[in-house]
Image (cartoon, rainbow, N blue to C red):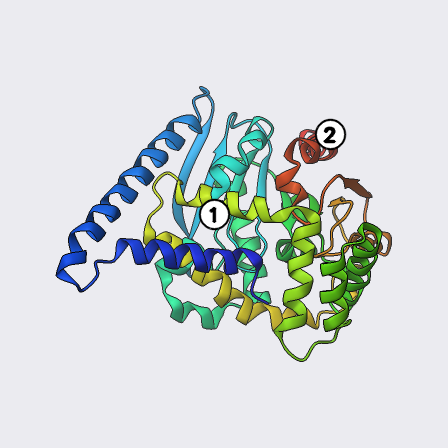
Amino acid sequence: MKSATARLMSLIVLTWVATSTPVRSAEAQAPAGADSQKLESMLEFVRARNARDYAITSPNGIDEAKYVEVGGIQQWITIRGEDRNNPVLLFLHGGPGDATNPWGYAGFRLWLKHFTVVQWDQRGSARTLGKNGSASAQTVTVNRLVQDGVELAALLTKSLGKNKVVLVGHSWGSVLGVLMAKARPELFYAFVGTGQVGDQTKNYAVAYDALVKKAEALRDEPAMRELRAVGPPPYTNGQGFGVQRKWSNFFEGADLFIASMVGRALGAPGFTQRDMLDWFEGQGLSAERLVPETRVMPATALAGEFAVPIFVIQGAEDFTTPTSLAKTFVDSSRAPSKEFVTIEGGHFAVFMKTAAFLDQLVPRVVPLARER
């Protein structure tokens, strides 16, 4: 399934490329070149401003961006935090392929007071894709990404001098995080899911019912008409999925967030047109490779026995990975400790309600990192 981010990015990227590419007409060539220069100058100004405004200036801070060898290939990570003594938090982006690094310099700024945040462009995503080329897509599987993730976590404990790391996964990243936590629990203080996937085999059916109820409660005639026209899943084509995603984003207020995310990526320090294209391409590529695997993944593959504490901090009205299924995931799991918490918002509550998310996250995981 192609993400809403990917669809919006396709329009923005194509527009950007069009304005940056000289036309064949001699008469039009000069203005097109001038417009391209103005656009690039504007973006360079924004990138320089963002580099200054989001810089880490604390004496014991850390701000690194580099390729590391993971799973036999070079993979891109950033490591940012105000105090190296804070717990290390490895964030697993969703999508699949929807890397947070292009806009995370701003999106994670509040987190850096409490954690050293590591963002990772997963295999097949963003700069990792750009470094290794589209041929690397053949190695993008769920099992391979789980192996990459635990290898990266082990590397971080050694390079940053920590016993373990805190693992946080959003959406697809919540699937990856569950499997990583089960595979190598000794590497993690806790697993925290948000936009938590509970049962992929039921996801769209439960989401459809929730969307219809929401549309009826709001008396939103266009939503009710379109949802009833496609009916509940299963769907034989992409139209039904597209209608569900459209109204999920609308009811969750996610459209503005997605637009701001793309805008921040365009203004990311050190970001280039090539990076933008790799980010976009990685979403489509990763979805093609991973969604067929995850869509048939039963709830039993996710819930079950954990050797680490698990917490799910979920948007109260998540119509993308339904809140009710996320709660069932926690209820049906066994762990040393577990908790399900809701905050205001939907699928992107972790980013759209950052302060509220941190209010729930910090008191649950920071003490665990201090005890061991």
Left or right, 186 with respect to 110, comes to right
Q: Residue 347 at x, y = what percent? A: 68, 49
Question: Viewer-proximal residue, 364 or 13?
Answer: 13
Q: Quadrant of the C terminus?
A: top right
Residue 248 percent across, percent down from the top left: 69, 55
Residue under label 1, please give it.
Answer: 262
Residue 119 pos. (x, y %): 51, 45
User: Seen in the image, is 282 located left or right of residue 306?
Assistant: left
Q: In terms of secondary structure, where does tag 2 sit?
A: helix
| Three-letter code, disc 1 | Val
Quarter of the picture holding the N terminus: bottom right
CA gap, disc 2 to disc 1? 31 Å
Which quarter of the figure has residue 321? bottom right
> Residue lying furthest left in this view?
26
Residue that extends furthest to the bottom in the rendered view of this protein: 236
Q: Nearer the viewer, residue 13 or 185?
A: 13
Callout 1 crowding tier (Cα within 10 Å): few <14, some 14–19, many ≥20? many
Badge 1 marks a residue whose secondary structure is helix
**Dot 2 amino acid type:** Pro
Task: Name which residue lies at 45% across and 69% down.
Answer: 137
Q: Quadrant of residue 301?
A: bottom right
Residue depicted at 27% across the width and 53% down the height: 20
User: Nearer the N terminus, badge 2 or badge 1?
Assistant: 1
Q: Is residue 120 above or below residue 199?
A: above
Instruction: Tell which of 240 and 215 is nearer to you.
Output: 215
Residue 126, position as x, y percentages in the image? 43, 55
Q: Quadrant of residue 17?
A: bottom left
Q: Residues within 10 Å of mark 2 (few under 14, many from 20)?
A: few
Residue 363 bears which disc, if any?
2
Does residue 49 sit above or below 164 in this rendering? above
Q: Residue at x 84, y 55 (%)?
A: 328
